[in-house]
Image (cartoon, rainbow, N blue to C red):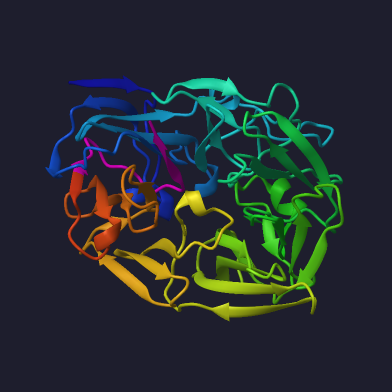
Amino acid sequence: MTETTDAASALFGTGDFFRRGNYAPVADELTEFDLAVEGAIPAEISGWYLRNGPNPREASGHWFTGDGMIHGVRIENGRAGWYRNRWVRTDSFKEKFSLYNADGSRNLRASTANTHIVNHAGKTLALVESSLPYEITNELETVGAYDFGGKLADAMTAHPKICPTTGELHFFGYGNLFEPHVTYHRADANGELTVNRPLQVPALTMMHDFAMTAEHIIFMDLPIVFNLDIAASGTGDMPYRWDDNYGARLGVLRRDKPFGDVVWFEIDPCYVFHVANAHDTDDGKKIVLQAVRYEELWRNNGGFDADGTLWSWTLDFAAGTVSERQLDDRAVEFPRIDDRLAGLAARYAVTPADHSVLRYDLSAGAVEEHLFGDGVPGEAVFVPSNSGPADESNGWYLAYVYDPGRNGSDLVILDAADFAGEPVARIAMPRRVPFGFHGNWIGD
């Protein structure tokens, strides 16, 4: 059974990489039931896999600015019950208006909502870092902008962290042209916003992600800085550029003192889009942080002519120093862990890489690879098993994989206990799923 809704009368020209191949958007919204499966879906997997990404309705100057679209699959009782794709119908999706008002303040409802999707305290939120989150249903229908009962007057990062111990949601907002450029926020396990703490930084930088441990929050103040000339040019390019004079540093805030001092550690200049994880050492004297590091980015334009690789930083409180170490030389992005270990010492981080996904053993330094032949995987999300030991080898990884030969996509399920082995199941998508950003598993 198939249901189609035409939501875009025409697509656009083919000048840029994000309008070609599997970066190209799809033209409409689709619902299809009882998807074909090769192999066997484990019966205990029950929930929704939802993934967000740009799917512009008209020509845009940069991939990051396309309208958000969620691609979702419902899995239960060993079946792939349905596939849906839906644009996130933000206020500015329905009626175009600017992100910034004439006085320089922001219209926080102007949103593409195209970067991530998370579930906390019963709310499923589509995120982009420039705006308020937008609540959606698990059937992918847009409810509307969500501001924590009127308590959030700020943008929300697309990379909030949920503490597996307390259930708290930690996040920040940035983007104010005037100080404070960054504010740290926290909501309790019930979704009540409890902390709004301004953070002092010298300038408006592109602070895409941050890190959390059991005891600390770590902010990344890095040298990609807002450029007013580009913002005013009307080109649609990202209004940020590399700044040799800005420096780079990591700021550490104790979670039990959210309004206390931030301790800053200078690091070598670099940029980080995505953190894999961070944790406190057993003696409480250091923090270890793993992330994908770019030596330099966006010096002359907002393009993607550089590769990121997995690195580790160790912050030593007593010495006031940071040691930095490259873990691998392969180009990777979108690192993920078992989210039950967020802020703790996770063993594995999994990243897409060209035609494979890599699983890094962060304890032993080893790397496993699952090859997809000509297939191109996206971000891989861990789904824990509900039976047996609660460890990182007892569960499955889910990822959309694009097959260029047939110009189609599958949702592939890998057994975490046999990472390099054959997939346990391939769910055939009824349409190509364009490359996107981030997603999450929402279990029943």
- Confirm whether the magenta stretch covers residue 434: yes
Residue 21 percent across, percent down from the top left: 31, 51
Q: Which of the two residues, 383 or 391, is positioned nearer the viewer here?
A: 391
Q: Which residues are magenta?
A: 427-444
Q: Is residue 4 left or right of residue 162?
A: left
Residue 146 percent across, percent down from the top left: 63, 25
* Residue 300 visible here: no
Q: Specify the principal SS of the magenta part.
A: loop
Give the quadrant of residue 99: top right
Q: Which of the two residues, 268 or 8, is positioned nearer the viewer here?
A: 268
Image quadrant where one finds the N terminus: top left
Q: Which of the two residues, 31 or 228, is positioned nearer the viewer here?
A: 31
Residue 191 percent across, percent down from the top left: 64, 29
Q: Is residue 389 left or right of residue 131?
A: left
Q: Is residue 53 left or right of residue 224?
A: left
Residue 227 percent across, percent down from the top left: 74, 55
